[in-house]
Image (spheres, grey):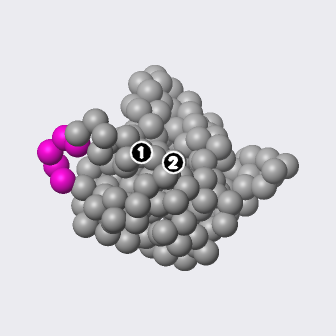
Amino acid sequence: MAVSERPLRADARRNRESVLDAAGELFAQRGDAVQMDEIAERAGLGVGTLYRHFADKRALLAAIIGRRFEAMTALARDADGAEEPWAAFETLLYGYLEAAEADAAFRFALLGPEKPSWNDIAAEKTDFSAITERIVRRAVAAGRLREDFRAEDFVLVTRGAMANMTADGAWRRHVALLLEGIRGTGH
């Protein structure tokens, strides 16, 4: 169940944010073992209130991703403003991964066993994808990325890095190695 398109009342908005905050904390701590009633309890709300906002765990995971994608889209817009195509690509890549590093619930929502309901966050995903596509095309056209690199590959790179995020920051080495493999001959 997607949240209605009409604006939420202030109390409903607060309840929704409380649920997202609680779910984010619990998913980050315990992953898929978290139950909806635990999320409601952590948010200080009844289970019925939780289900009025989110029909199931998939919808809740999508909302977590959607909330992060709003910030990721703003980051992508900023990166897209870089004049040099490689700088735009690196800014987007590292900015995305640094934001993901700080948000374990986002990583879980993307990488966990339960696939989110992308229909619930289609607008956020579309905006981000369009900007990423433009940045990648610019970098490929400038010879800064391999000519066979596509925006879909950005997803593979980021998911690989997120799967390797540990407390020691090893994902940065993972990305540095990947960048050497995808850099174009025009660097």
How many numbered tags mark residues here?
Answer: 2
Labels 2 & 1 near each other (Cβ < 8 A) = yes
Would residue 176 be found to the left or right of residue 96 on screen?
Answer: right
Q: Residue at x 37, y 41 (%)?
A: 14
Looking at the image, which is closer to me, 18 or 164?
Answer: 18
Picture quadrant of residue 121: bottom left
> Residue 21 bears which disc, if any?
2
Whether residue 183 is visible to the viewer of this picture, yes or no, is no
Pick out the residue farthest to the right. Answer: 168
Which disc, if any, is residue 105? Answer: none
In the image, 70 versus 34, the foreground residue is 34
- What segment carries the magenta color? 4-8
- Whether 71 is drawn above or below 117: the answer is above
> Residue at position x 28%, y 36% from top?
10
> Does the magenta segment cover residue 158?
no
Q: Residue furthest left?
A: 6
User: Where 25 sits versus 36, above or below?
Assistant: above
Q: Amino acid at mark 1?
A: Glu
Q: Position of residue 71 (x, y in %)?
A: 44, 37
Mark 2–mark 1 Cα distance, whole angstroms, equals 6 Å
At which x and y percent is residue 163?
67, 63
Question: Circle 1: is it few (<14), some (14-19), or many (20+) Cα within 10 Å?
Answer: some
| Quadrant of the image containing the C terminus | top right
Does residue 75 show up?
yes
The kind of secondary structure the magenta stretch mainly shows is loop
Q: Which mark is residue 17?
A: 1
Q: Is residue 87 left or right of residue 55?
A: right
Q: Residue at x 31, y 40 (%)?
A: 11
SS at badge 1: helix
Residue at (43, 55) in percent of width and height? 45
> Eyeballing the image, is 22 above or below 116?
above
Q: Amino acid at mark 2?
A: Asp
